[in-house]
Image (cartoon, coloured by chain):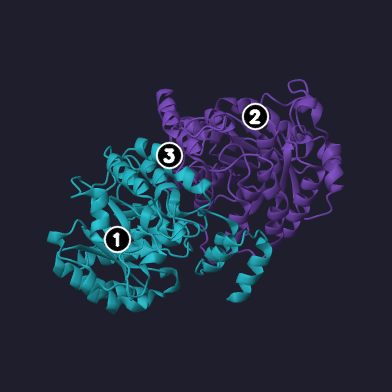
Chain colours: A purple, B cyan
Amino acid sequence: MARKGDLMTVRSDIKVVDATVRDGGLCNNFEFSDEFVRELYKTNIACGVDYMEFGYRASKKLFNESDFGKWKFCDEEAIRGIVGDNDSPMKISVMADVGRCDFKEDFIPKAESVIDLVRVACYIHQIPAALEMIEYFHSLGYETSCNIMAISQANESQIESALDMLGKSSVDIIYLVDSYGYFYPESAAELAKKYVEYGEKYGKIIGFHAHNNQNLAFANTIETMSYGVSYLDATASGMGRGAGNCAMELLLGFLKNPKYSLYALLTFIEKHMLPLKAQGVKWGFDIQYMITGLMNQHPREAMKFTSEGRTDYCNFYKFISDNE
Amino acid sequence: MARKGDLMTVRSDIKVVDATVRDGGLCNNFEFSDEFVRELYKTNIACGVDYMEFGYRASKKLFNESDFGKWKFCDEEAIRGIVGDNDSPMKISVMADVGRCDFKEDFIPKAESVIDLVRVACYIHQIPAALEMIEYFHSLGYETSCNIMAISQANESQIESALDMLGKSSVDIIYLVDSYGYFYPESAAELAKKYVEYGEKYGKIIGFHAHNNQNLAFANTIETMSYGVSYLDATASGMGRGAGNCAMELLLGFLKNPKYSLYALLTFIEKHMLPLKAQGVKWGFDIQYMITGLMNQHPREAMKFTSEGRTDYCNFYKFISDNE
């Protein structure tokens, strides 16, 4: 499969998705100030970002509202408190996790909602449950995506089955998600080609969501894009769980479409992201995340290592190697 | 041109070059303690690193010895003070800059020296001067490389002329050097293919030296490697001027040859690199370096911005854009 487009021109299928509040919320328990979220919303519009994800719509039966910031739940009123009727060209998304969302109770019809896109996140063995949710959201009038997480632990025949199942569904977008930051540009591109091949067969859009465990989140994003991935996730300063995500500033710097602009984001980073870091909110590339990425493991042990302020990387490497 | 090798196997032509003291020395005026350099030397041997570069051999007529740490000059005795006769499989290199090195006075024959490789750094218009040095070092018995810096500002016909001139010389290794951190994996790979094509024609080895301005140093290193680049520069914790280099820990984590090992490096990073950072020595990815990288400019303005403790990225972007 040849690359689509080149380094000089514009591809009109590209959409940039800001996931700062959603994936970054995993770093600070979703406790962003309204000012932060409002300024990010304005910044994203000024920068030409296509979608802004506000958080999860998590089950209030499973999660206690008082234990989290409001973007864990993304009530319609909370979003409207920031965006009003969202009189902008930017669309709004929320994420709904399979098994952690009361989807039949907690979503209203799209015609009454300010949300445009519902992204359904699942592991590969949960595709049937994801399909049920996708068809429901589709019937309510939403755009839908399926974000199959931890794909580096699935094998090729599972992935092909999943892509066939999703291909035959109503889903609009299928996401390749490198949850563990395991892929290299070469391996991410190989998998992206498979997704794009199925996407072309079934008329589905393909997206990519990176993690920065091996400092490859941006590289993998532009490499998979070059083979036809269209929806690109990024976050301000790369804020996201563990090693974080593809940095929005790098992605906007790369894209050639004049609708995208860096200026407002650079100011937002200075005024809002640097203070978060200074307050001690932790994310970004570090040795412990590199190690879990190399070993194709969930970052939870690396997050624990980080939160304990440890730097004995060699012990951690021995521990994670032994853990296999 | 097809990729050489794959993600599962070993390529015997790969050589890892540690440039921590040389490129990292640009961050701390070459003022490393002997303990640091000695521990790094032992670490590199334990990790299977193929070459360790100790610094520059700069002219003592142009540079005042008292203004710099000793690795700016790399006297034979200074290196021997660390490595003795270097009774190890690892080779020793130094860098000699065109126009900043008294090469006819300051180098002894290889038979009397502990140095194995002299890397000649030049801009593309200095190739004739580099060739004079290369032939001289070759006549003394050294391995030689030519590191053509700032190649992202040269045009294709200049690059082809330079590769022809070097192809016909005695040089052993020709380095593709992304001094400004301008390249994307796709563009770095395209240029690497050209270097490898000339290398195959003339029987020369090709190397790659990355900078991390767009957080792509590691990605570009493994991408160019996949198209036949053999000599790979890296530094502990990515220490190097401005945004730094390809991190050795990422590269060793990637390489599949069992001769390479991460353990000793992880301990070295904890014991020696974290303290350097804590002492305030500055390097690594940051927005200002991304901006000079995007604009294909020398990082000096970004280094000044960093040293002044500024964070007004938007002003910096406007300034650098205007500077063009």
State which chain disc 2 sits on: A
Q: Is residue A81 visible?
A: yes
Q: Residue furthest top?
A: A61
Callouts 1 and 3 in the same chain: yes
* SS for dot 3: helix
**Where residue A47 appears, x then y in whole percent?**
71, 58
State which chain disc 3 sits on: B
* SS for dot 2: helix
Q: How many marks?
A: 3
Between A81 and B242, the one lying in front of the other is: B242
Residue located at (51% from left, 62% from top) = A6
Which mark is in front, 2 or 1?
1
Which amino acid, by three-letter code, is at mark 3?
Answer: Lys
Residue B74 is tagged as 1
Which amino acid, by three-letter code, is at mark 1?
Answer: Cys
Question: Residue under circle 2?
Answer: A130
Question: Residue under circle 3?
Answer: B271
Circle nearer the N terminus (1, 3): 1
Residue located at (45% from left, 54% from top) = B217
Q: Residue furthest front?
A: B66
In which image quadrant can residue A131 be found? top right
Q: CA distance from mark 1 to mark 3?
A: 24 Å
**Where residue A76 appears, x then y in whole percent?**
84, 37
State which chain disc 1 sits on: B
Which amino acid, by three-letter code, is at mark 2?
Answer: Ala
Q: Is residue A259 visible?
A: no
Query: Left or right: where does residue A33 sit relative to residue A252?
Result: right
Residue located at (62% from left, 26% from top) = A128
Residue located at (22% from left, 73% from top) = B105
